[in-house]
């Protein structure tokens, strides 16, 4: 079966995400994904990696809070998985983030997928208190702290970036031991990180041919680490609604492919867009 998800396009508030979620579940999509950038500095020297000229598109500042959005989506669906694609972990406090995730996972019946990233925009990361030059080290430490909070009655953590004494943190997530941690991006050591402390990989700029090679590498690394390769997922993000391409990604080792709909302004237009994608890739 082809597991196909839908991502929320920008501007992310043009259409109510509850409508998108309800329609996506009705049409048979497997998951809904919401990304974040809390803000975009007006003046920045960082180059946007998604365009040749490095200029940040105007729409890139029009994100919504993913947890509020996915909670809204949860309330109008029963089966649709709810993913962050991605959360900028160094920009959030792990104690509060663990609480948000546990609450969403519990109330959704264990449907949350924790897609994470470390960010590319230095000015944003630093304004939010992140260590941009060591952002993946900080991200790893945050995830390890959250795992303690999710899995233990009394949790403590003592690291370079986060340090807290024994605390009680409830509720615990519905998924055990915790929702899957899915690492985004194409950093040089991303697959090693996935195997070491993650549960999946979320690439967004790849081809079926490259993915097949990455899947083989990921399986080898997992075996070497004593992990079951089949327990580590690959979710390919931001793809067009092309059935042949999606099938090729699945055949290459992807567990799901996430399609990005065209941005529209009304619910009727979004309903038509999602229906068109479903007819192209799910029928």
Image (cartoon, rainbow, N blue to C red):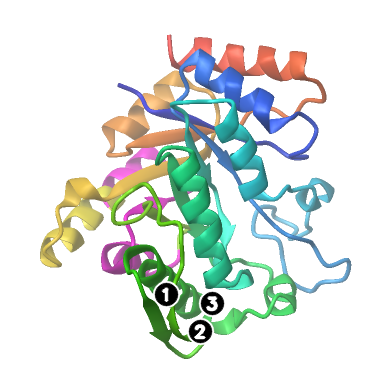
Residue wearing tag 3: 135
Q: Are marks 2 and 1 in contact (CB under 8 Å)?
A: yes
Specify whether residue 212 is painted magenta: yes
The image shows residue 80 at horizontal and vertical percentages of 47, 29
Q: Which residue is mark 1?
A: 145
Q: Kindly identify the residue that appears in the image at 12 percent across and 60 percent down.
A: 223
CA distance separating discs 3 and 1: 15 Å
Quarter placement of the C terminus: top left
Q: Position of residue 158 (x, y in %)?
A: 42, 89
Q: Secondary structure at mark 1?
A: helix
Q: Viewed as shown, does residue 33 lie left or right of 195?
A: right
The spot of residue 147 in percent (x, y) is 37, 67
**Considering only order in the chain, which callout, 1 or 3, is on the residue closer to the N terminus?**
3
> How many marks on residues?
3
Q: Is residue 192 magenta?
A: yes
At x 47% / y 74%, what residue is drawn?
142
The quarter in which the N terminus is drawn is top left
**In what element is the residue under mark 2?**
loop
Q: Which residues are magenta?
A: 187-213
Indicate left or right for 62 with 243 as reference. Answer: right
- Left/right of residue 218 with respect to residue 68 in the rendered view: left
The disc, 3 or 2, on the residue closer to the chain's N-terminal end is 3
Q: Nearer the viewer, residue 36 or 58?
A: 36
Which residue in the protein does label 2 denote?
162
Q: Nearer the viewer, residue 39 or 171?
A: 171
> Of 206 and 7, which appears nearest the observer?
7
Q: Is residue 220 left or right of residue 250?
A: left
């Amino acid at each position: 079966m082809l597991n196909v998800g839908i991502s929320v396009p920008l501007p992310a508030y043009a259409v109510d995400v509850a409508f998108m979620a309800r329609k996506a579940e009705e049409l048979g999509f497997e998951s809904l994904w919401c990304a974040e950038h809390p803000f975009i500095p007006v003046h920045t020297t960082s180059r946007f990696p998604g365009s040749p000229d490095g200029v940040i598109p105007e729409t890139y500042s029009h994100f919504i809070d993913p947890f509020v959005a996915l909670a809204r989506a949860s309330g109008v669906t029963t089966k649709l998985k709810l993913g962050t694609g991605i959360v900028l972990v160094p920009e959030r406090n792990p104690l509060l983030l663990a609480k948000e995730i546990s609450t969403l996972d519990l109330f959704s019946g264990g449907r949350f997928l924790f897609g994470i990233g470390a960010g590319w925009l230095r000015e944003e990361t630093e304004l939010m208190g992140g260590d941009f030059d060591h952002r993946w080290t900080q991200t790893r430490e945050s995830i390890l702290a959250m795992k303690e909070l999710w899995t233990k009655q009394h949790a403590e953590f003592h690291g370079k970036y986060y340090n807290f004494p024994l605390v009680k943190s409830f509720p615990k997530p519905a998924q055990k031991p915790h929702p899957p941690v899915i690492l985004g991006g194409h950093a040089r050591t991303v697959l090693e990180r996935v195997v070491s402390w993650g549960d999946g990989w979320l690439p967004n700029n790849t081809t079926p041919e490259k993915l097949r090679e990455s899947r083989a590498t990921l399986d080898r690394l997992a075996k070497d680490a004593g992990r079951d390769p089949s327990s580590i997922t690959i979710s390919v993000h931001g793809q067009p609604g092309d059935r042949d391409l999606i099938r090729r990604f699945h055949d290459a080792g992807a567990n799901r492919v996430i399609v990005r709909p065209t941005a529209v302004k009304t619910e009727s237009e979004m309903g038509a867009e999602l229906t068109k994608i479903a007819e192209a890739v799910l029928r």
